[in-house]
Image (cartoon, grey):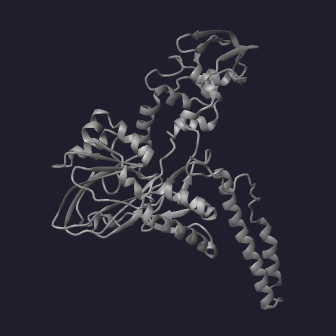
Amino acid sequence: MPHKVAVNAGKKPSKISGKHLLPQLDRISSEKEGSSPSEVLRDLKVLQNEVHKIYENHRRLASTLSGPMHVRKDGTLEQQSTIYSAQIEFESNKVSLQGKTIPNIWLRDNCQCSSCMHETTKQRLQDTFAIPKDLSIKSASLTKDVSANKTRISIEWSDGHKSTYTQPLLANAIANFETRASIRQGLVTPELWGSDISRQRATITYNEAVRENMEPVLQNIRKFGFCYVDKTPHDTPKATEDLLRRIAFIRETHYGGFYDFTADLASADTAYTNIALGAHTDNTYFSDPAGLQAFHLLSHTDGAGGASLLVDGFAVADELLQTDREAYKVLSTTNVHAHASGNEGISIQPYRGFPVLEHDPKTGDLLRVRWNSSDRASVECPIEEVEVWYDAARKFDALLKKKENEYWEQLVPGRVLIFDNWRVLHGRSAFTGKRRICGGYINRDDWMSRFKMARFGQEKVLGALAGS
C-alpha cells in the first residue's frame, strides 16, 4: 500500500543565532593570558559544541520547513475530496462553496472574460491592483447545468464589470494545497521496482508512440520512471531525434543538443569512454537537472559488453527511509555541491548546493534524486560532522548496489530508452569494440506539461493554477 512517513515533523526549531557565542569569545580572549592551557582548551571545546548546535538547529529547521518527507503518498486525482461535486451558494451577498466564503478580490482577479483573460494565451490582462479595495457584488444569479449537475454564477460588480464563474473554477479556490498540487505537479503514485522489473518492463513500439503522440510513453515514464520504444528505425539517428522532439524541444548543454557519439572523450566526460559507470543521475552540476534522458544504441561492432544499468532511485530512497530514518533525514537536509569542469574554460556549478534527496516543501513528496559521485564537490556541513553525511551516503550507496535493486538490460539497435533523470539512476558495464549512441535531454517542465495536459485536460490543469 502507498504510505508516507513523517521525518522530524512537528518539531519547532531552536532560534539560530551566533550572538550567544560572543560572551564565550570575549571571555576566552580576556582570560587567555591568565589561563592555563587546559582551561583555554576547555573553553574552546565549549565553543565548538555551541557551533555544532547551530548546524544541528539549521538541519532541524530545514527538516521542519520541508514538512513530512515521504517517497510515496496517497491522494491522487482519483482520491480527491468531494469539493469538485459541491454546488455554488450565494447568500448575504457572498459567494461560497461547502460553507467557505470566496473573497470578492479573488473572484474579480480570476474573472475569465476576454477583457480580463486572454482567450488564447490564458494570461491575465487586467491590472489586479486597480480593482477597488471596497469592491462589492451588485447582483448575482445562479444557473444549473442539468446534464453536468454543475452550477455557475453570474455576477455584476459594483464597478459595473460582469463576470461568470463555473463550479470547477471556484472549487479550486478552496481546495487544499495537496489536491491542487496533484494536478500542478502531475502527481501519481509511482510504482516502485527492483531487478524484477525485467519481467514487466514498460515497452511501446515506435509506431504506437507516434500514433498516440507519445502519450503512452509519458504515462509509463511517470509511473515506472522509464519506457522503451522498440522497433525504432536505426539506420540514422533521425528517427530517434524526431521521437524526442514529439515530446518537447531537446535541451542544449555544454555537450550540445541532440548527441550522436562514440567513446572518444570528445566531450571530456567519462560517459564518452568505454569504462564501467556506476548508477548515477546526470546534471547534478545544474541548478535544474534535465528531466528526461534518452539513449539509443545505433550500432556496436567488434566487441561486447556495455549492458545498461537502471536503478529506481525512489525505491532505494524508500528502502533507506524504512531502515534508517536518520540517514534519510541527513541526505534530505544536507546540501552537496557539484561541478562539471572537464572542458577547457568551463566549470559549471549550481547556484547553491542541493541535498541528495529533494522534497516538495509543501507536500513532502520526494521530487528528485541527485546522485553522481564523479561530479560531487564539497558537502555543506562543518568538517567535524562530515562523517555523518558520509555514513548516510554509504548506506544509500550500498542500497543502490544491491543486486535486488539493479536492473540490467543489453540495449540493441532499434530500442530507445527514455527515462526520468529525476528518479531513475543509470549506468553501464565496461565494453570493448566501437559503440555509436545517440540521444538527448528534455527539460522537466516541458515533458511534465505534455503529461499533465494529456492526463488531466486543459480545464483541470488551468483550474489548479487558479487556486489561492
> Seen in the image, is 30 located left or right of residue 155?
right
- Measured as percent of width and height from the top left, residue 53 is found at 73, 68
Q: Give the farthest residue toward the bottom.
A: 36
Instruction: Give the position of the C terminus as an image quadrant.
Output: top right
Residue 172, quarter of picture: top right
- Residue at x 76%, y 14% (from the top left corner): 92
- Measured as percent of width and height from the top left, residue 76 is found at 55, 37
Q: How many marks?
A: 0
Viewer-closest of 148 and 49: 148
Viewer-closest of 148 and 271: 148
- Residue at x 25%, y 41% (from the top left corner): 206
The relative height of residue 467 versus residue 189 in the rendered view (above or below) is above
> Seen in the image, is 361 located left or right of residue 56?
left
The relative height of residue 452 versus residue 396 in the rendered view (above or below) is above
- Residue at x 71%, y 66% (from the top left corner): 54
The relative height of residue 169 versus residue 148 in the rendered view (above or below) is below
Determine if residue 160 is in view.
yes
> Seen in the image, is 104 located left or right of residue 450?
right
Residue 12, quarter of picture: bottom right
- Measured as percent of width and height from the top left, residue 310 is found at 38, 58
